[in-house]
Image: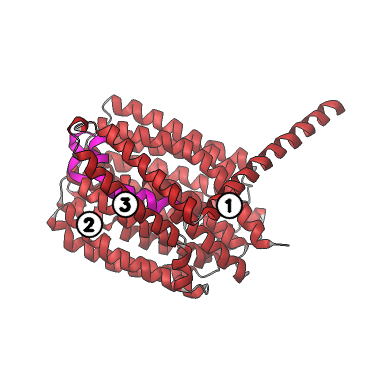
Amino acid sequence: MNTDGNITKIVFRSISWLAIFKFSSQTLSWVITLIIARILSPDDYGLMAMATIITGYVELFSELGLGAAIIQKKTITQTELSSVFWFALTISILLGALCFPLSYLTSYIMNEPRVIPLTKFVAIHFVISGLYIVPSNLLRKDLKFKELGFIELIAVMTSLVVMVIIAIHGGGAWALLSGSITRKAVDVLMIYPKAGWYPKLRFNIKDAVNLLKFGSVLALGRSLYYMQERSDSFFAGRLWKSDYLGLYGFAKQLAQIPTDRIVSLINQVSFPAFSKIQDKKKEFKKLYLHISKMTMFIVIPLFTGGFLLGELLIRTILNEKWFSMYVLFRYLCIVQIFVSMNAINNFVHVSQGRPVWSLYYNIVSAVIMPIAFYIMVPYGLNAMIAPWISVFVVICIIWTIITLKKIKISLMEYIKNLRHPFQGSLLIALTVTALNKIINQIPELTGLNYMKLAVLITCGAVTYFIYYWTFDKKYLADIYNKFKSQKKLNQNIKVIRKKSLMSEQQKK
């Protein structure tokens, strides 16, 4: 039995289903995000960042890595699941209550009294998150990403409606926070029927603690990662005004869109897939290379385009209150290439039962990056590029090399695996740069930013396709054949379900 082929097909099928729903929900999300950004101000985004920076760290401990422990454990009993549910819910309620004193601490640290009611309101998010942990990770464990994708689509659509209504009526930062809570609430309402699991009135502290032993190491690592990821906003929030912090935060949010929306769906499938073949070294290695290539095939051209067209993009899709962030946005796009490259490395170690390795990586990042941000914050918005483009990139490269060594993939094999995405993106850069210079010399196109952007994006995409058609047609054909087989499989499932339904009706 070809295990590697089977797991690769399962991963591709899972990603395909998740991608369909992700594409639908995130396309709508991107459009609404841009509309809301035009309605709200950088000050609103800055207040949201301030209100959630401390509570966001505390929220990491409401999950305690229990979701990953559920996925990684090969077999898990109903008693264990119920014990985890009641334990997680209790922790979430306690941490939700903690939001009230934390609101005053946040106000004191950030010197901003307006964050007090916002931070208190985050308590609702804590409680809802506690209800979500077990059923969502059961679906992930079984690679049921079609169900997860459908739930996310409905939740995103509902939350976006809430955000727009509140933003139009002058809700400011409350629109952003209410949208986040609405989305999580809809997730919880829909997840239990899809998972087919409900908690029993059973609790065994030993069962919860056994899973907690694995998850706590992971939770500590995630908390350290959060410190590294949000330390820039923490130091900036203390020194800058809220509108300046809002510019920085929104530049990061825009740059992270492909990572959050595209790479995250690949990673959601990667961890349970790696966990299923954690003891099979050959299949594990092949799957790592396959996922790495798939990720880079998508994100490198996107981030290359973001860097090249960053200024034109910001000036086209947003109004002038956001223009000053375009330089920062461009370089953060380059950083996101390394974020994407590094994304699955932690999953590799955790899935093979080495969460402590991931912890070491997060300790190093949590020590070095905050120091770099602290040094650069006084020099202003664009100075924050330096820590990301230098220190962070070096950390990502070293962690990737360590991961490759552990799973016995040579650096040259890894580079060779990714050569086509990099070379194709380099050709995009040359084409778009040359074409942009030509367009800028045509007076009739002055001010027609939407047309220029459309032409440059189209030409970049065509260039990338031509490169792959010329130098790696096999990979394009492989993607096409997998989509074709997925479509055929879906049709067969529909036929089987239809026959089953007809058979049941005949019996009746």
Q: Mark 2 or 1, which is nearer the eye? A: 1
Q: Which residue is mark 3?
A: 429
Q: Residue 447's spot in the image, x, y percent?
A: 20, 31
Q: Residue 340: x, y in percent?
A: 40, 57
For this rendering, which residue is in front, 249 or 169?
249
What's under tag 3, amino acid-wise? Ala
C-alpha gap between disc 3 and disc 1: 26 Å
The label number, if any, that marks residue 385 in the structure image: 2
* Element under disc 1: helix
User: Contact, CB < 8 Å: mark 3 with mark 2?
Assistant: no
Distance between mark 3 and mark 2 Cα atoms: 21 Å
| Residue 311 position (above or below residue 278) | above
Instruction: Specify whether residue 301 is painted magenta.
Output: yes
Q: Please state the extent of the stretch shown in magenta in the rendering.
A: 298-325
Q: Is residue 259 visible?
A: yes
Say how many tags the image has: 3
Amino acid type, label 2: Ile
Residue linked to disc 1 = 478
Q: Point out the residue furthest to the left here.
A: 379
**Of tags 3 and 2, which is closer to the observer?**
3
